[in-house]
């Protein structure tokens, strides 16, 4: 019975190290990590615990090219009822990344999106994988940020571009 828990923990530790990936200096990776996050179903995950209700964010839909819309922070997410990433089967691994979770207010928001607190002038995409989603931000041909969302559900592999 202990083996599945250990396996999940090992996977979490491996993916938590991949939340921000870049060959740029650490200070630049940290800058992007603080201003870029991912959204699933109205819940934002970002390495920034200083966002407040009413703060603006930009949602960059990776499915529909060049579609960006403004949303606002509603409040900090407290449960899996407000934020699917915090549901019991997902929570432990998603919290290991060190991200803060917020409920957002947006009309017709995409189900999956990259979110920014400004406009870093990057392009955004995501890939569905075995039990998660990898969100990415690119500067030209260079990947400068990645965020991982553990969904705990198998899904067909697919990437947006």
Image (spheres, helix red, strand yellow):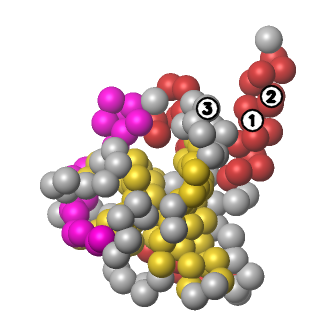
C-alpha span from label 3 to label 2: 19 Å
- Residue 1: x percent and y percent? 79, 11
Q: Which mark is residue 154?
A: 3
Identified at 75% across, 46% down, the residue is 13
- Judged from this view, the residue extending furthest toward the right is 3
Residue at the (77%, 22%) spot, across then down: 4
The tag on residue 96 is: none
Which badge, 3 or 2, is on the more N-terminal residue?
A: 2
> Range of the magenta residues?
67-84
Give the side of residue 10 with respect to residue 158, left or right.
right
| Of marks 3 and 2, the one in the foreground | 3
Q: Earlier in the sequence, mark 1 or mark 3?
A: 1
Q: Are marks 1 and 2 in contact (CB under 8 Å)?
A: yes
Check contact, mark 1 vs mark 3: CB within 8 A. no
Question: Which residue is depicted at the point 73% across and 58% down?
Answer: 17
Identity of the residue furthest to the top in this view: 1
Identify the residue position indicated by label 1 in the image.
9
User: Left of 72 or right of it: where is 87?
Assistant: right
């Amino acid at each position: 019975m202990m083996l599945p828990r250990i396996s999940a923990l090992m996977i979490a530790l491996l993916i938590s190290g991949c939340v921000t990936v870049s060959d740029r200096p650490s200070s630049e990776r940290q800058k992007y990590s603080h201003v870029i996050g991912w959204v699933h179903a109205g819940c934002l995950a970002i390495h920034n615990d200083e966002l407040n209700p009413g703060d603006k964010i930009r949602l960059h839909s990776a499915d529909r090219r060049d579609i960006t819309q403004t949303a606002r922070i509603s409040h900090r997410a407290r449960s899996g009822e407000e934020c699917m990433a915090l549901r019991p089967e997902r929570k432990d691994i998603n919290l290991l990344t060190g991200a803060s979770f917020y409920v957002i207010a947006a009309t017709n928001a995409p189900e999956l999106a990259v979110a920014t607190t400004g406009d870093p002038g990057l392009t955004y995409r995501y890939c569905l994988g075995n039990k998660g989603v990898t969100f990415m931000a690119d500067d030209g041909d260079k990947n400068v940020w990645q965020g991982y969302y553990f969904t705990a559900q198998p899904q067909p592999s697919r990437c947006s571009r």
